[in-house]
Image (cartoon, rainbow, N blue to C red):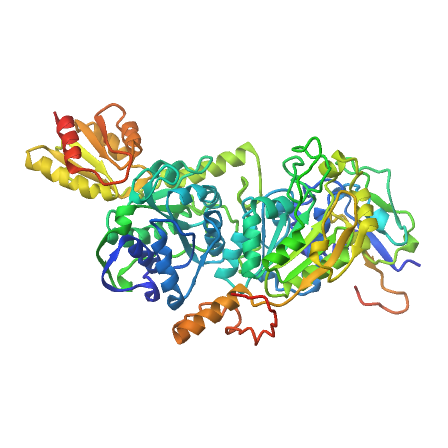
Amino acid sequence: MSTELINPVERILRSDRMPHIWCPGCGIGTTVNSFSRALIDSNVDLKNLAIVSGIGCTGRVAGYVKLDSFHTTHGRAIPFATGLKLANPKLNVVVYAGDGDLSAIGGNHLIHAARRNMDLKVVCVNNLVYAMTGGQTAPTTPGDVITSTHPYGTFDPSFNLPHLVEAAGAVYVARWTTFHVRQLAKSMAEAFSKKGFCFIEVLSPCPTLYQRRNKMGDGLDTMKFYKEKSKIRNGSPTAEADLTKSGEIIVGKFVDRDRPDYLSLMKNQMVHTLGDRYKDEYAAQSGGEGAESCEEMGCEEEMPCQ
Amino acid sequence: MHADPAGVLTGTHFIDGDHAACEGALAAGARFAAGYPITPSTEVVERFAARIPTVGGTFIQMEDELAASITIQGAVWAGAKAFTVTSGPGFSLMMEHIGYAAMTETPCVFIDVQRGGPSTGLPTLPAQADMMQARWGSHGDYGIIALCPNSPQECFDLTIKAFNLSEQFRVPVMVMMDEVVGHMTEKVVIPPADQLDVTPRRFTKKAPGEYLPYKSNGDGVPDMVKAGDGYNFHMTGLTHDERGYPNMTVSVQDKLVKRLRSKIDNAPDLVCYEADGLEGADVVVVSYGITSRVAQRAIDLGRAQGLKVGKLRLIIAWPFPEKLFAELASKVKGFVVAELNLGQMVNEVQRAANGAAKVRHVGHAGGSVHDPQVILKAIQEVAR
Amino acid sequence: MAKGTVSILVERCKACGFCVEFCPTKVLALSSAFNSKGYHPPQMVNPEKCSGCDLCGMYCPDFAIFGTRLPAEKEVKDAR
């Protein structure tokens, strides 16, 4: 066992905080692994990359990566990230949060950021449950499973997150599982360089709570389950990507389209109305980009942006 | 440091408190605001939305106050001075993030244009019933600073002061206006930029690797940093140590939370009030905000009747100037505390007086300013 | 002759078994040793089959293992 060689992702990690708190077989670490590799391989400017996380097991991600990192309040990573981005557009802002954080308490912010096409890259680790607090039902929990707040089995319909965010306006929507480490890293790298609201859902095991309560084995069993049940369908209609207890898992890159992002729209409007009087404070920070018109951006989207 | 002239609308204006507060924020260097519409505060951000594109900066109307109150904090950590504005119901929604700002030591300003409550209450009518909420609205032990303007001019001046204090102490600062002060139109003089003192953010001079995000720099306040400068810092609302890392132990909690309290409670320059006639007074009338304008009438009437009436107008209401009141209590017969609520700051006066003087509350549930005769009657009764 | 080798940070491992399962050439198995938390970290049981593909490293949730390609004896290959 060599100790002179360094883990290729070590420079992204806060090594002084390892080992981390996530359970054996939890997939969050694997997603962070893919994330780190995506950062390195895509040659992103790490100095200008900020990561904002919410609360929960996935919320702990911010504390383990060696970037400007913000562990915010439950459900509010997206508005915090919005403030960061708007006050310094040069920053590449990643939001890393769980399914409950993003789609329950944070649901309103999720849909509005997508609507605005805020230039944020959102990684939603979906373990189908509120893990940190002991395994309660989340809006993504499929039907007929046991959770601590549905001791007799869940019955309320669950969100199809890719469908939700696509409808709200996201320009990049993908879903993978922690089994799809390469594809996940690739999607993350694509999102880093894509302007606009990008959303990547990653299904991940919660062996201690979700899997255990439902007798679905441990993390490794779940990884094998993902391998067996996943069907890669790039470009598939998001409406068909519902998740069930043990059915097919449609994964892939579902949406990759172009719409002007919030800052472009804002600049456009201001220049249109104010002309020279508009003080684009961020022209220097964003590399001197002027307002891009829809035509300049090559956007042929029929969907109204304004 | 002088104000940036880009944000200073030098001149003599005839504007209301809401508008003046916006100009104060701009003069102080605020280049980011997030808000949500709520009467009677909305004009503050409406004006900011109109002004900021030609000053240089951003306004965003967020989807709710929960978002607005933390969007401004993201902007702060990107390096901007930022604020939000609201009234009662929105203030309640913002409480978690006021606590978050206190815990993470994020300098930012929250303007609350108080209206009748509780709940939806009286959207277009005044009250001063959010005073205790300003101090204790979020959970846990933390400290904040709160200022009370009593005129549009003070809405301008004290908003600048609020920004300055928030940078000096790395704490959220509340500007506790009320519907009357917010909607009354008066003369507001905005001086040239070089006559305005603005406190810049105290960024660290240490290099990445040396810098500890939550190690206090002498005065109990750590130096700050911003995203994009290569510090790779971590910031969390969990109890954290000097590295900014979560460290959830009794000893770290003790050290951190006590420092958050003492940097405010023990600060010498956080006592700010306007007073006259305290020397030899029998009765001191205590008030703040719009009530102080009405109280002045009552005080003048009382003095005209030969009563020895002192005036004490709180400008910084939190931290409460306990020592001042404790000293006064031993010299006067009593205090008349006039406020537009059923008893909030009066409890602090009571506590500080500690039985050494009478304390009499004059107030009502809100909706209109006081009748000076009612305050005068209380003065007369306490003076006996 | 192995084309690669694996490095294991024993104290980080939580014995989830991902690396063992997903190694394409079945190089790894959980050992009977314990780390200080009581987990059985993996070990190379078929080291000669390691290609240094680093799939173990990509899957590991604990950053406890990674693969490295070894330079070829006759030609030096680029580091991955």
**What residue is at 88 percent from the left and 65 percent from the top?**
C72
Residue B199 visible, this angle: no
Left or right, A76 with respect to A230, comes to left
Looking at the picture, how far across and down is residue B10, in whole percent? Answer: 26, 64
A278 to C14, vertically: above or below: below
Is B88 in front, or is B345? Answer: B88
Looking at the picture, how far across and down is residue B276, in whole percent? Answer: 15, 41
**What residue is at 64 percent from the left and 46 percent from the top?**
A99
Look at the image and tell me in which quarter the C terminus of chain C lies. bottom right
A37 to A60, vertically: above or below: below
**What residue is at 46 percent from the left and 51 percent from the top?**
B68
Total marks placed: 0
Is A150 in front, or is B313? Answer: A150
Is A78 in front, or is A285? Answer: A78
Residue B324 placement: quadrant: top left
Left or right, B371 with respect to A97, comes to left
Looking at the picture, how far across and down is residue B358, in whole percent? Answer: 21, 25
Residue A199 visible, this angle: yes
B84 to A264, vertically: above or below: above
